[in-house]
Image: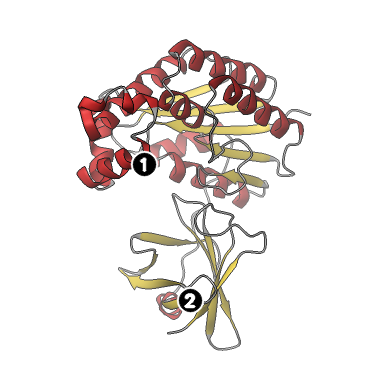
Amino acid sequence: MKKNLILIEGIPGSGKSTFARFLANQFERDGIPCGLYLETTYDHPIIEFTGHENNELFLEAYYDRWSKFLDHFPKEEVVVMESAFLQSPMVHLLHKEAERELIKSLVHKVSDRLSKEHCNLIYFYQKDAPTAINKMIEQRGGREYLLRKHKEYKDEPYFRNRQEQGPESHISFFLEYAEIANEIVHELNIPVEITENSSADYETYQKQALENFDLKYVPDPVLETSLLRKYSGLYHHQEMGFKISVEFINDGLWIFGNKRLRPKDTDQFYLDDICVTVRFITDQTDVTGLLITEKDWYANRNDEGTVFERIS
């Protein structure tokens, strides 16, 4: 039986994670079981957080992970996956200053394997890549973001070879990634929906996707303000020594400072762009805690979830 796989790709900051979450929600709300793999999903079947220094070993391991995943496809009818097909392998190999034809050959090899399945690629790009990348950098902290990236990756061959550029070498890196990705999506032998998204009209993009996959739009449930206020508070994980604040601001709940919790149900919420869902735990009258229920590299690595006790 062929597998139903939807890949979401594009330059960083193009809305991949949010769009992947939207699609997965809509499949579920239309009664179609759907698996979702975001870039930070813990135990990701394709993306590895520890890389190979040898490019040939990386190519072999990366293709092998795709083969194993497709041979042992999850039980869900559909899987939505972002950043695993283009961004993850291309970023790794560009960091290692791999030959550009080697990068393309890997993508084509995986594409050939995926062509045997029911696989669709949704690709976001912008004609004015420099403007798009500079906008993404500003949204993520501007100069401070570049300095953080430079500190993290300055010892990779790509950046060692461009020491004279300093932190700005990461702008060159993003531009080169965009150039190669924009070229290769036109060469693939899987169905590709290419969307120029400089207008950021995601409502239109969502409608197009719903039509393409024959889905009926089902919005998030609307919850009473009194219930949302009830969930706001401070939650603590004693063993981790970590506290989470949930705030009620502008008729919504916010977590991790600037992340909006969007309702899936009366007591369960999701985040647009990271692999985290939150379920609030209540007794008969009071909210006693919250449970992070998706497996995420940074927030929860447990199958049973991570529980935070409410302390105020």
Q: Where is residue 55 in the image (x, y as percent from the top left)?
A: 54, 21
Residue 120: quarter of image: top right
Q: Position of residue 213 (x, y in %)?
A: 58, 34
Disc number at residue 152? 1
Disc number at residue 236? 2
In the rendered image, the vertical position of residue 299 relative to residue 153, given as above or below = below
Q: Where is residue 4 in the image (x, y as percent from the top left)?
A: 67, 33
Between 112 and 97, the one lying in front of the other is: 97
Q: How far apart are labels 2 and 1 at the CA level?
A: 30 Å
Question: As shown in the figure, which amino acid type bears the numbered disc 1?
Answer: Glu
Q: Quadrant of the N terminus?
A: top right
Q: Which of marks 2 and 1 is in front?
A: 1
Query: Neighbour class for label 2 at 10 Å: few (<14), some, many (≥20)?
Result: some
Question: As shown in the figure, which amino acid type bears the numbered disc 2?
Answer: His
**Secondary structure found at label 2:** strand
Between 158 and 21, the one lying in front of the other is: 158
Q: Quadrant of the C terminus?
A: bottom left
In the rendered image, the vertical position of residue 212 relative to residue 27, given as above or below = above
Residue 303: quarter of image: bottom right
In the rendered image, the vertical position of residue 310 relative to residue 65, given as above or below = below
Query: Neighbour class for label 1 at 10 Å: few (<14), some, many (≥20)?
Result: few
Residue name at image x 24 percent, y 38 percent: 135
Residue 195: quarter of image: top left
Q: Indicate which disc, 2 or 1, sits on the residue closer to the N terminus.
A: 1
Q: How did the renderer colour the structure?
A: secondary structure
Residue name at image x 39 percent, y 42 percent: 203
- Seen as rendered, the residue at the extreme right is 1
Residue name at image x 52 percent, y 38 percent: 210
Q: Where is residue 85 in the image (x, y as percent from the top left)?
A: 54, 28
Residue name at image x 44 percent, y 52 percent: 272
